[in-house]
Amino acid sequence: MHRGSTGTYRSTSFGGETVRAFVPNALPPEPPIEFTTERQRHLERVLLACGRLDAITALLPDPELFLYAYVRREAVLSSQIEGTQSSLSDLLLFELDSAPGVPFDDVAEVSHHVAALEHGLSRLREGFPLSNRLMREIHGKLLATGRGAIQQPGEFRRTQNWIGGTRPGNAQFVPPPPHEVQPCMTALEQYLHDERAPGAIIKAALAHVQFETIHPFLDGNGRAGRLLIALILHHDGVLRQPLLYLSLYLKQHRARYYELLDAVRLNGDWEAWLDFFFDGVETTATGAVDTAHRLLALFDADSRRVREYGRSTANALLTLEALRQRPVADIRLLADRTGVTFATASRMIDILVDLGIAREITGKKRERAFAYSAFIEILNEGAEPL
């Protein structure tokens, strides 16, 4: 369906030149999105894939373990899209305060992403509404320190920004002028709470494009917009555990992603965007289910190997359980989590190293840190720095 532009252009001045800034129309799209039989069937497959993911999380012995790992994997991937070079191992080491050689600015940025996502999920569980206030709070966490701290964290922008180019005059895209940001975000918030709005999958798809088009913050809009997808799906009950994040899919299809955002703005091609988004959610949900099965099989196989080791089985199993919860750990953390002495934890981790389950990663004789290598390798697929 051809709608033409999904907004209007407004003249605005910046740096002594006048540019045309794009102000999107409020959601939902007009005329309504065309739902062919095939598109409806696609949506049903997406919902089925999400249902499978929701079901497996209900069966997991410790859903929080998967949530801990997936939140960090998402933080790494989402930040990589914005140009950071940190890996999942970098982040886990950073959180352990044992990160020699890790690019501090990059890994701190990823750590802030974890804090932002966890803050948003915690607020939703408290019953706080999915709102502009919550998005500003999340943004404040996202840009708490480092490079983003000078970009008005937690506040909608008061100056013009742009995408691509060196200034608005040669930019690829110029979002709404500053005085239009609050009205646009108010309209988006109203859409999120409109009882006549379509289901959560479609709502998340449309809201993400709208958020990225408004670009309400000076920095961090891409990361915040991807967090918005996860928050909508969790808030609207598609997933009890927020385990579906699209950053890996968007990282793998970056060019097509940006092309489709432009197609919505210029031509009103919401249908092509929805097809892409549906593919992303279905692929991601199916991949998350597969990852959960692989991790469960890994945990079961490694537990059997420890039990067959023949001595100190009980404490070694406790240590393995602690590594499942924190796949990069030092001996002090393992001792704290298992309730054994430092010396006992040291002996137990050496057993896991002998079995090839754990690997020492600092190369030091003191203040050693260990990784549950196979666990991290499964999570790390696709999360290598760009």
Image (cartoon, rainbow, N blue to C red):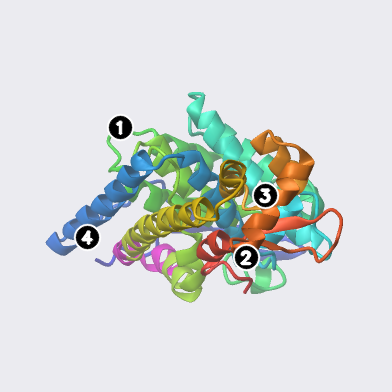
Give residue 23's position: percent from left, percent from top: 51, 54
> Which SS class for mark 3?
helix
For the question of whether residue 271 can be seen, the reply is: yes
> If the image is split into quadrants, where does the N terminus sit?
bottom left
Task: Say whether residue 105 is left or right of residue 62.
Answer: right
The crowd level at tag 2 (other Cα within 10 Å; few <14, some 14-19, many 20+) is many
Q: CA distance from mark 1 to mark 4?
A: 23 Å
Q: Which residue is mark 2?
A: 80
Q: Which residue is mark 4?
A: 42
Which is more foreground, mark 3 or mark 2?
Answer: 3
Range drawn in magenta: 262-275
The kind of residue on which mark 3 rests is Met
Q: Residue furthest top?
A: 127
User: In terms of depth relative to the viewer, which is nearer, 180 or 383?
Assistant: 383
Q: Which residue is mark 1?
A: 195
* Of callouts 1 and 4, the N-terminal one: 4
The crowd level at tag 4 (other Cα within 10 Å; few <14, some 14-19, many 20+) is some
Give residue 275's position: percent from left, percent from top: 30, 64
User: In terms of depth relative to the viewer, which is nearer, 6 or 223?
Assistant: 223
Which is more foreground, mark 2 or mark 1?
Answer: 2
Which residue appears at 55% of the width and 64% of the height? 374
Which residue appears at 60% of the width and 54% of the height? 75
Q: Is residue 263 magenta?
A: yes
> Which SS class for mark 2?
helix
> Which SS class for mark 4?
helix
For the question of whether residue 155 can be seen, the reply is: no
